[in-house]
Structures are given as structure tokens and as C-alpha cells.
Image (spheres, rainbow, N blue to C red):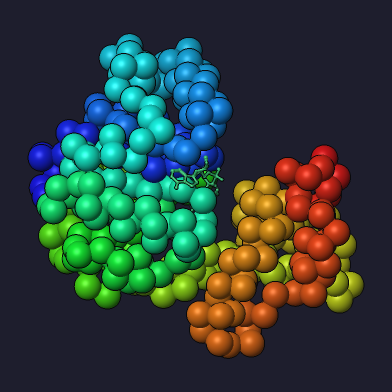
Amino acid sequence: MNLDEIKTIGVIGAGTMGHGIAQVCALSGYQVVLVDVDQGLLDQAVANITASVDKLHAKNRITDEQFAAAQTNITPSLALSDVSDAQIVIEAATENKAIKLDIFKQLDTLTAPETILATNTSSIPITEIGAVTNRPAQVIGMHFMNPVPIMKLIEVIRGLVTSQATTDTVIALAEQLGKTPVEAADFPGFIANRILIPMINEAIFALMEGVGTAEAIDTVLKLGANHPMGPLALADLIGLDVVLSIMEVLYAGFGDPKYRACPLLRQMVAAGHLGRKSGQGFYSY
Ligand SMILES: NC(=O)c1ccc[n+]([C@@H]2O[C@H](COP(=O)([O-])OP(=O)(O)OC[C@H]3O[C@@H](n4cnc5c(N)ncnc54)[C@H](O)[C@@H]3O)[C@@H](O)[C@H]2O)c1
């Protein structure tokens, strides 16, 4: 599959990431079939996309043509089979291995044999996902960052047997979407989470040990390392449950104690202090 053959993109999952991916693809002129299992979430996704493109249009950040494309190019659907005409499918469903493996098995039978099957997973090995299909050379990671319309990076992750042709097409597509693709190998956490999440975990250890207050730790990283946001404020934004589950993936994947989750992180998750989404994390919201 070459870039110029791609006309229709299937997006599976219409949540935080899926609706952003659908929006970015539609604004770049692709037809998008956006699939979810929940009609309420599909409706919410369409409303979120409309609100986002209204704002971008009002600020002259997108053209009239792109604004119109966002309305006409996205077809929401509850049926996975509606992606059967897509040349590439980008899966952004719930981060659960059983759910994803089931979706990929179905996509393998529903789509044409040359269709590329990409996943936005943060932690599930691309090689394992590819192995449940009959086309592992065409299975690849496309790891978008949140919020998708704003963040420039896409990590492009090759499974052990992902082909060069698939990688080249996905890199070209990422550029066509206005993003900067960076290749990563299929090891736990890829590049972004491998480095970012242990840094956050270390900041939580520093807080637990009384090395500094939350404000002190965040201020040091902001002013001392020029980070736009301190690691504890960032943890609250990401969600402490998500931070913990990524640490668990790194620990399980490498079997190295340097990736052990901080006990204070576990305690906060157990208490339901998940950050912004619960109103309480390292800060109150
Ligand atoms: N949120 C982030 O910051 C972020 C960043 C990068 C990657 N990711 C990855 O993106 C993926 C999606 O994450 P999210 O934050 O958008 O989750 P989310 O919970 O907001 O959305 C997931 C959506 O998938 C739908 N879904 C569940 N099972 C499905 C199925 N069988 N078929 C179709 N849809 C189904 C759910 O109804 C839900 O709308 C995950 O793999 C996650 O690891 C998330």
C-alpha cells in the first residue's frame, strides 16, 4: 500500500484519542469511518470534533475547505465491518489486550489483504498484535500524543516483522497529517513513555522521601530543566492510574527493579486520587 492509494481511513474507538485522530485525518482530506461500540460516545466524539474545528476555524488555523471537510468526511458507525473499504485502519480502542486482539482478528478478515492495520496502543507489543493476524508485516504502531490535533509527534513502532514498505507508508501518512513521525522499536514504553513515566515516578519518590514539596519539585523541573510543566502536575494531567499502569508494563516487560512503581503512587491510586479527572491528585482541582 502506497500513500497515494490511501483514500479512506478507518478509526476504531471514538474516545479521547480516536476522535482526535479522526479529526486530523478528515482535515487532511481523507474519508474517515469512525467506529465505536457505544452510540453515546460516538455522538460525543462528533460533538467534540465540531467544537474543536469551530475553534480552529474562528482562529483562522484551518481553511474553509478543511472546516467543511470535518463536517462531511467523517462517517460514525457502530459496525466494525464499515471499515472494510479502508486502505488503513488506525485502532484507538480501550487499552485492553483482549479487546485489541479481538479487534485485530476481526479486521484481518474484514479488510482487503493489502490494508495496513495500525494501533495507537501505549503499551501492548505491536509484535503480539501482529501475530493474531495473517498479515503481521502490515501491522504497525502509530502512537499519537494527546491532544491529537495539537501534538506534533507520532511514534511509529515496528513490530519484529513489520515490513519496510508498511513503515515507509505510515511515515509518509504521518507527514501528510502534518505530524512529525519518529521511528521506535517494539520494546516496552517505546521511547516517550520509557523516558517520561519513570521520570514522573522518580518525582513521586522524591516527594515521598521529603526531598521537596510538590511545588518545589515541579518548580525545579520547570525552571531548572525548562519543562513546560512539572512532573507531578503532568502526572495529574495524565491520570495517576495511567501512570501506574505504564510503570507496571515497564516493570513486567523488562523485569528490572529500576521500573518499580513508587508506593506513594500506588497509595494514591488506591485512594481514588487520580489527578485532574477525580479532582484530587498531587494538587486539588
Ligand atoms: N489518552 C492518552 O493520553 C493516550 C495517548 C496515547 C495513546 N493512547 C492509547 O490510545 C488508545 C485509546 O485511548 P483513549 O484514551 O482514547 O481511551 P478512551 O477510553 O477515551 O476511548 C476508548 C474508546 O474505545 C471504545 N471501544 C472499546 N471497545 C471497542 C471495540 N471493541 N470496538 C470499537 N470501540 C471500542 C470505547 O467505547 C471508547 O470510546 C489506548 O490504546 C491508549 O493506550 C492514549
Please determine whether, in this image, residue 48 is positioned above or below residue 178.
Answer: above
Please determine whether, in this image, residue 277 is positioned above or below residue 250.
Answer: above
**Where residue 165 sits: x, y (%)?**
13, 60
Q: Is 201 situated left or right of 165 in this image? A: right
Nearer to me, 6 or 79:
79
Residue at x-position 62% and y-position 55%: 227
Q: Residue furthest bottom?
A: 256
Residue 211 seen in the figure: no
Nearer to me, 270 or 195:
270
**Where residue 231 sits: x, y (%)?**
69, 59
**Where residue 223 sits: x, y (%)?**
70, 55
Q: Tell me the quarter of the image containing the C terminus.
A: top right
Residue at x-position 30% and y-position 52%: 106
**Where residue 151 sits: x, y (%)?**
46, 43
Q: Quadrant of residue 143?
A: bottom left
Number of disc labels: 0
Q: Is 233 situated left or right of 3 in this image? A: right
Residue 202 seen in the figure: yes
Q: Is 171 situated left or right of 54 in this image? A: left
Residue at x-position 34% and y-position 40%: 80
Residue at x-position 41% and y-position 53%: 120
Q: Is 197 situated left or right of 1 in this image? A: right
